[in-house]
Each structure stands twice: as structure tokens, then as C-alpha cells.
Image (cartoon, coloured by chain):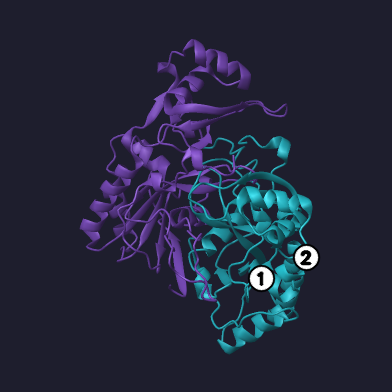
Chain colours: A cyan, B purple
Amino acid sequence: MPESMTMFRLEGLPDFQQGDDLAQVIIDTFQAQQKALVAGDILVIAHKVVSKSEGACAYLDQITPSADAIELAKTVNKDPRKVEVILFQSKRIVRAVKRPDQQEGVLIAEHKNGYICANAAVDESNADHPGQLILLPENPDRSAQLLCQRLEAHFQCDLGIVISDTFGRPWRLGQTNVAIGLANVPGVMKMEGEMDAFGRPLSVTAPAFADELAAASGLLMEKSAKAPVIVFRGLDWPKTDSQSRDLIRAQNEDLFK
Amino acid sequence: MPESMTMFRLEGLPDFQQGDDLAQVIIDTFQAQQKALVAGDILVIAHKVVSKSEGACAYLDQITPSADAIELAKTVNKDPRKVEVILFQSKRIVRAVKRPDQQEGVLIAEHKNGYICANAAVDESNADHPGQLILLPENPDRSAQLLCQRLEAHFQCDLGIVISDTFGRPWRLGQTNVAIGLANVPGVMKMEGEMDAFGRPLSVTAPAFADELAAASGLLMEKSAKAPVIVFRGLDWPKTDSQSRDLIRAQNEDLFK
């Protein structure tokens, strides 16, 4: 394990629109900054730029809410069209809540990809205009892998990518970034068989490596800073055929619920 | 917000015993490594070295389990004396679980300081010998603040400290480090009133800054590496009169339960 590492933000990225070639824009921006990626670098990328370039967005003026959405919208004081989009993105609604001090409540949902999060990750912040909702990429692992292949081909070295979103947490206040799409980067580091510093087996230690990276990226990824790409340099990690569902606990194994 | 930051591990720390002067050992170790702390540095410190030096430990051979502990121990196949210690550290047991594939189950507990975690953070790993259980420090914020005052006096600059523990998470696999004691470092960054990149209010964005730091520390803090002190350099953060309970969601506000 290395003694130190650095993190830096890729400055100078433009706004993204559907159809933009995200990989090429990232490559061009590195070149414009006279920077390059080196072997072992990991990029944490806020999903919004992936979603926008892939067109993973919904538009309120194109949505006709279902009866279910209209009914659910009343309990949380949300636009029924937004609720329709949330339902479409979800396997199930875990909880619908509106506290008295909230203008608009929240739907805790299981996203169709398995993540449990607020409003099935359907988001208005950093949308390009009112009425646009940003969704998660259709297949964030695939997005990460395609992007990683392009960057590896250009920079001629092994790289890793974590696509992140910002989630709230049960029991704890504030949000952290979590990993929702992976290329090469292990979701969870398996440490079975290793010993602790006193020679006893570390049987239950399994650091959520990709989530550690995602959370760390938040230290340099201010929402208001248009800084969706953070580079981690100096870590030692095993290139892995990983998927974001490696980080999702099976419902029947959830000890915390 | 800075464009880059570095993290490094303080090498060369010894094992800790009750009565050790943790602040002085850290200072001496920095000096031995010809390193110094500079203004704005934040140290994330694994609680185990704080607990050990403060003697926040229990010893199985000194514990007589209560009838409640004996009963609960059966459901999770734990040593009843360990369950007695867990109960003593807890406000309540949230859930007792033993999966068929587990030799020993887990008690999800609300620690008396408010954290919800496995076995009320009572831990055998990295104990000095079998039968020793490491507890959380009695008052982790106070521990962090005293340590921070000593380090600030020595290095003559403003510093921050996060004391961390390793927690599992609902819904997601793997563990991350979280903040359980704070000195100067904000638990949650308040971003109310700020605007996103498109000028809309970021009303619900509140990064869990101390947990971002704690999670990031896991990238360099391998359990087996005896590396309990990680330094973050280059961040821009407001010195704050903070407490670890700033990160704890009130039970009646928990939208995820």
C-alpha cells in the first residue's frame, strides 16, 4: 500500500449536451491543460456529465403522469410528472416522506439498477433548464467501461473509472458520493485470508474501495464548481472485472434494515 | 476550493498501550520522519489508537454476563460476556442477526453516543491479545479536541482532527471509515444559499465533509498496515466548533428506515 497519493480536479471542462463525445472532450481538456493520465490513475466522474452526453434526461413537458403518480405526488407535494419519471426509474418505492418543514418531500426508491436512494436519483440540480430532469445513465458500468477503453487507448496505460452520484445515508446526516458505475476498479476489496497487525484473520474486513474513492472525490468536487472529473494518482489497486452491483447488498442480507 | 490535495500516511508509529501520550508519540514520530504539520492539515486517526492509549478496553475474564446478555448471546452465537459489553455500550439493540453461513452473528446497535453500527463498535480485531475488546473512546470529540490542542501548540498552526471507525452500511456492501470524533473539522458543510453551476439554489446539498475525509483515509489506512494516522494537506475548510453528533440523523428524521 502506497504511503501517499494525490487527487486533482480536471479544470476547464465545458457544459455537456446530448451527443457530446465525453471521452474526446476529456482527452482534449487534458491536452489543453498540458496534463496526461498515467498508469494506475483512477478517475471519479460525476454521473451528470455522463447522463447529459448520453441524453439520459427527461422533460416534464413530455410526461403524462399515471393515476399512481398523481396519487403519490399528493403525499409528497411533488409535480406528478416528476413522480411519473421517478416511478419509471424505480423497482419499488421504499418510503414516501414529507416533513412539515419541507416544501417538497422525498421518495426513497430502489432504482431499477438496485441502488436505494432519494427520488431514484432523478435530479433537477445542474439541469440545463427548468423542466429538464437528469437521470442516471442507462447502464453506468457500460458507460464507465467504454469511456475507460477510450482513455486507455489514448493514454496508452491501464486506468480505472468510477462514475459517482451523491446519495444521502440512513442514520447519518449530509451526503457523500457513491460509486454507481465501475470500470476496472474493484467495488469492494476482498481481504479474506489476510491478517491484522497482530496476526489474526481479518475475516470481515472488506473496504468498499470504489465508495471510498467516490466519497473522497467530494473533497474536490463542489457541485457549484462544474468540476465533474477528479483524478486519483498514486494508489496501488488490482485491475478487476467489476460491476457496480458488487457494492449492492442483497435485500435478504441487509442486517441494518 | 483547491484544485488538488495530497494524503499521506504517518509511518513509524508504535503499538499503543493504556497511559501512552498519543499526542507526544505523534509529535515524536513526525520529528523522527523529519516531517511537520502545516496550517490547514487535517489528521484522520483510527479510533483504536485513541481507545488503547485511553484504556477504553474491556477484558472478557473480568465480565459477568447478565441474564439478558446470556439470552441474546444465544440468538447470535456470541460469547455472552462480549454481548454484556455490547449492551453496556448501547442505548438499544436495533437488530440481532445470524445468517446460516455465519459462525457468529451480529448485533446492530445504537451506541450510547448515537452511532448505529455493528456490535456497538466493540471490536476484537487489532486487540493486543485474545480476550481484550476495544471500545470507542469515552468521549471521542473531547479526545479529538485535546489531541488537536496539543498538536496545534507544538506545530504552531490551525489543524483539524477526525477520529474514525470502520462501519458497514445499510444497502451497500463493504465498509467505509466514518467520523466518530471531531476537532475543528465541520461534520457537514452547509451549502444553503449557494447556487449550483446554473444559478439555482443548492438547497439540499450538504456534503458530509468529515465522513468524506474518513472514507478517503481508508485508501491509505489498511488495517493490517498499522497505519492509524492519515494526513490530508491542501484542502480549504472553515474551522468550526463541531461535534460528531452533527453527523447523526435524528431518529424521527430518518427517511431511509
- Amino acid on which disc 1 is placed: Gly
Residue A233 image offset from top left, x and y in percent: 55, 69
Question: Quadrant of the image for the C terminus of chain A?
Answer: top right
> Can the viewer see residue B122 in this picture?
no
> Can the viewer see residue B195 in this picture?
yes
Residue B231 image offset from top left, x and y in percent: 40, 59
Residue B89 image offset from top left, x and y in percent: 43, 28
Question: Quadrant of the image for the N terminus of chain A?
Answer: bottom right
Say which of B165 and A178 sits in front. A178
Give the residue pinned by disc 1.
Answer: A131
Say which of A106 and A214 sits in front. A106
Name the subunit of mark 1: A
Give the residue pinned by disc 2.
Answer: A142
Residue at 61% across, 22% down = B76
- Disc 1 crowd, CA 10 A, few/some/many (<14, 14-19, 20+): some
- Amino acid on which disc 2 is placed: Arg
Q: Residue furthest top?
A: B67
Say which of A1 and A152 sits in front. A152
Q: Are marks 2 and 1 on the same chain?
A: yes
Badge 2 element: helix
- Disc 2 crowd, CA 10 A, few/some/many (<14, 14-19, 20+): some
Residue B15 lies left or right of residue A105; in this view the side is left
Residue B77 image offset from top left, x and y in percent: 61, 20
Q: Which of marks 2 and 1 is nearer the N terminus?
A: 1
Residue A157 lies left or right of residue B241; in this view the side is right
Compared to A59, does A209 lie above or below?
above
Compared to B9, does A206 lie above or below?
above
Name the subunit of mark 2: A
Badge 1 element: loop
Compared to A36, does A214 lie above or below?
above
